[in-house]
Amino acid sequence: MMSKRMFALAALSASVMTAGVAIAEDRSDWPSNFTIGTASQGGTFFAYGTGWANFVAENLGVSGGSEITGGPMQNMALVHTSEVAFGLTTMGPARASMEGNSPLAPGLMMDNVCAVFPMYETPFSVTALSDSGIESISDIPAGARIGFGPAGSTSDTYFPAMLETLGVDFERRNGGWSDLGTQLQDGLLDVIAFAAGIPIPAVSQLEVQTDVNIIEFTEDEMNTIISEYPVSEFTIPASTYTTLTEGARAVSMWNFAIADCTLSESFVYEATKLTMENNDQMVSIHNSARTSIPENYDKNTFIPWHPGAARWFNENGYTIDASLIK
């Protein structure tokens, strides 16, 4: 006859076995590996996305990695077509892609893209070498060679039009941020128009190697841009770069992590939980993750939420209406 102690141990063993089965069942639809679309090396998307992929892989036990891409526009397309499981995007390019206005796939409504969590704001800022004499937007000479990042990136999509609105005449150049930084230092470019989370690795690297000017918008220039583009007022803190002695006026656009809407609900739930509940570790990946906190979920007003991500937010007091969940 089984003693009470033996019965308790047997019950505990059965419970553990049952829990093990449950965990196995929960993971039955998980991918064996995953990839996140980032952007070019030298940019914040690459650093943030690569670090996040490693963080998730290590903690959830699923092999993961990052892919160098053209940035937000291309990531929307890659996620929509299930070529990557996750991606990083910016709200302006995301809306254009969902409405069928992506230059990469005109007319294609990218509706297999779901929001996962808020990342950070992307400031739009201009950098030139100090010895160029360019200290303001109005100082940029006619015909200046300006690097706008990878073709189809957030910077390349919006910054040329913004500068044209401000009356700047320029030659448009594209490339990865690290490559453009080298070109600026070598005198092959006059200006780089960055749109990336701060601190931008390429700018930090330039500061180590040479003297640079981080050029802010005047108040009138900022207000003109805000009135015509989907951006808001932003100040680059002086602590961001050694070059800055005080905050620099800029404009910004929010970024969100996105996922293939068909991706396992429980997998996305666990990835969201890990990210939103460990901000200190996210900040150790990149300082811009200071705003990768659940309170900023409401900065997304149009990308449908992945069911797994929405479940975590709703369980933790951040209400996402059923109509906004895919």
Image (cartoon, grey):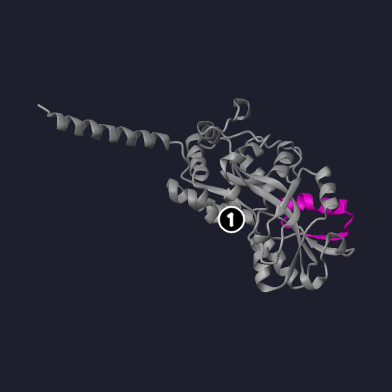
Q: Is residue 19 visible?
A: yes
Side of 16 where 66 appears, left or right: right
Q: Nearer the viewer, residue 193 or 40?
A: 193
Residue 130: x and y in percent read: 77, 71
Residue shown at 74%/36% (left/top)? Answer: 99
Q: Is residue 152 part of the magenta span, yes or no? A: yes
Residue 130 sits above or below residue 14 on the image: below
Q: Nearer the viewer, residue 123 or 104?
A: 123
Q: As drawn, which residue projects farthest toward the front?
A: 246
Q: Under tag 1, what secondary structure?
A: helix
Residue 292: x and y in percent read: 58, 46
Q: Is residue 67 visible?
A: no
Residue 85: x and y in percent read: 56, 43
Side of 33 where 43 appears, left or right: right
Q: Amino acid at mark 1?
A: Asn
Residue shown at 81%/50% (left/top)? Answer: 222
Q: Is residue 245 part of the magenta span, yes or no? A: no
Residue 175: x and y in percent read: 72, 60
Q: Which residue is mark 1?
A: 287
Q: Nearer the viewer, residue 108 or 240?
A: 240
Residue 200 sits above or below residue 108 on the image: below
Is the C terminus in the top left, top right, bottom left or bottom right quadrant? top right
Residue shown at 20%/34% (left/top)? Answer: 9
Q: Residues in magenta?
A: 149-173
Is the N terminus in the top left, top right, bottom left or bottom right quadrant? top left
